[in-house]
Image: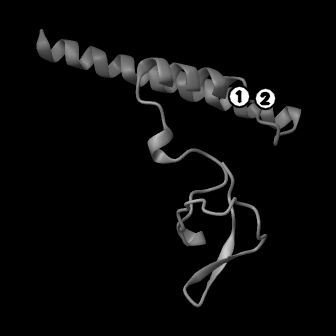
Amino acid sequence: MTTAVGTIKNGQVILDQPGQLPEGTRVEVLPVSAARPALGMREEDWPTTPAGIAALAARMDQVEPGWLNTEDEAAWRAALRAQRDRDKAESDQNADRLRRIWE
């Protein structure tokens, strides 16, 4: 998708780079503050099916952080593992409590 940027002048959009879009192209104009971010996904683009979520998770797993040095990345990954372990332990405890309630 082509993004064209411009300014409203006298009720018309004046593009910063004229000629970006063919004559007659229909456009949607949003104020810059309301435009979707350049990075990330729009809310309506997030997958909602199990297969779509799994495919997105697999793509996300392939992305390397890139902004961390080796030492910081190791610490970050260790913190993620520790958080996962805490979450699993808490989930197991909650499941045990529920089992006792329903027995």
Q: Which residue is mark 2?
A: 74
Q: Is residue 50 above or below residue 76?
A: above
- Residue 56 sits in quarter: top right
User: Eyeballing the image, is 10 above or below 68?
Assistant: below
Could you say where residue 71 lies in the image, as x and y percent from the top left?
Answer: 85, 33
Q: In the image, what residue type sits under mark 2?
A: Ala
- Asked which quadrant contains residue 101, the reply is top left
For this rendering, which residue is in front, 103 or 27?
27
> Which image quarter is the C terminus in?
top left
Q: Residue furthest bottom?
A: 10
**Circles 1 and 2 in contact, beta carbons < 8 Å:** yes
Q: Find residue 88 and report its horizontal and vertical position in percent.
A: 46, 20
> Mark 2 packing: few (<14 Cα in 10 Å), some, or many (20+)?
few
Label at residue 5: none
Number of numbered discs: 2
Measured as percent of width and height from the top left, residue 1 is found at 66, 48
Tell me what residue is drawn at x 57 percent, y 44 percent: 41
Q: Give the answer, above or below, for where 11 lies relative to 58.
A: below
Q: Residues within 10 Å of mark 1 (few under 14, many from 20)?
A: few
Report whether 94 appears left or right of 59.
left
Q: Residue at x 79, y 70 (%)?
A: 17
**Which residue is rendered at x = 69% and y = 59% of the image?**
22
Disc 2, SS: helix
Q: Amino acid at mark 1?
A: Arg
Tag 1 residue: 77
Q: Is residue 55 above or below residue 9?
A: above
Q: Residue furthest front?
A: 24
